[in-house]
Amino acid sequence: MVWAADLNGGVNAYEYSGTNNTKGAVNAYSYRGVGVVSNADSNQAGVFTAGNSTPTGSLYQGVLRGEYTGSLVADYVGVYGYSIPNAANNYGIGVRGEGGYRGVYGYGVNTSGSSTFGVYGYANGTGTNYGVYGSTNGTGTTDYAGYFSGTLYATTLTGGTKPFTIDHPLDPENKFLRQLY
């Protein structure tokens, strides 16, 4: 067990083994729950960085990686973010992604034949709720708040289009043309 209290940084650990393996400078395992707990009086309880001029397979999998590798079958979470500093005023972002190409990337893999979701959004509240919300404030030649490549399916449609009835262009005296959605 390592414990340190230091106003200038706490614990520093380095590992220079010269081999690429799964061991790191600090490894933690717990039979009773949480392997590592970090608390800080500043706004950052942990900072993880990686820098290498040569791409490696491990960097493609993330600087900080969370995995569930157990054998129980359920929707266990690999990485969980929680931030509700003042729920009455709707503040807090649970997970934020920022990237030069993709801010957040979702990829679902399922070999059982049932539904798979790359990104799943759900909202539940007393006001207006958006399961998925997109906006853009770009300076590109074309800016889309949402772009879908593939079939788009919706169980209900409200807002942008409204039902209407007009005279049928081929027989305006006897027929109507109705747009229902």
Image (cartoon, grey):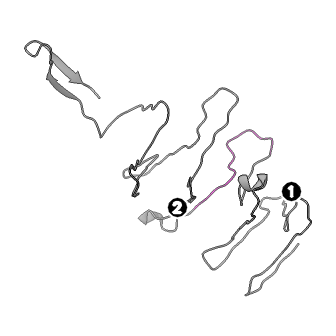
Residue 49 position, x and y percent, is 71, 67
* Percent position of residue 83, x then y: 55, 63
Label 1: state its secondary structure: loop
Q: Is mark 2 on a helix, strand or loop?
A: loop
Q: In this view, does 19 lie to the left or right of 56?
A: right
Within the image, what quadrant is residue 65 found in?
bottom right
**2 or 1: tag closer to the N-terminus:** 1
Decide which of 45, 19 is in the foreground and name it. Answer: 19
Q: Residue 103 at what x, y percent from top left?
A: 55, 55
**Residue 109: quadrant of the picture:** top right
Nearer the camera: disc 2 or disc 1: 1
**Label 2 crowd (10 A; few <14 / some 14-19 / many >=20):** few
Characterize the local packing of mark 1: few (<14), some (14-19) or many (20 or more) Cα atoms within 10 angstroms.
Answer: few
**Horizontal and vertical percent for residue 2?**
86, 75
Predominant SS along the magenta part: loop
In the rendered structure, which segment of residues is drawn in magenta? Answer: 70-82
Residue 137 falls within the magenta-colored stretch: no
Q: In this rendering, is residue 65 above or below 6?
A: above
Q: Quadrant of the N terminus?
A: bottom right
In the image, which disc is placed on residue 143? none
* Relative to 168, residue 68 above or below: below
At label 1, the amino acid type is Thr
Give the left or right position of residue 102, taking residue 169 as reference: right
Cα–Cα gap, marks 2 and 1:
31 Å
Residue 44 showing in the rendered view: yes
Of residues 100 and 104, which is closer to you in this image?
100
Query: Label 1: which residue?
Result: 22
Residue 80 located left or right of residue 29: left
Q: Badge 2 is on which residue?
A: 93
Locate residue 95 relative to residue 4 in the image: left or right. Answer: left
* Residue, far left: 173
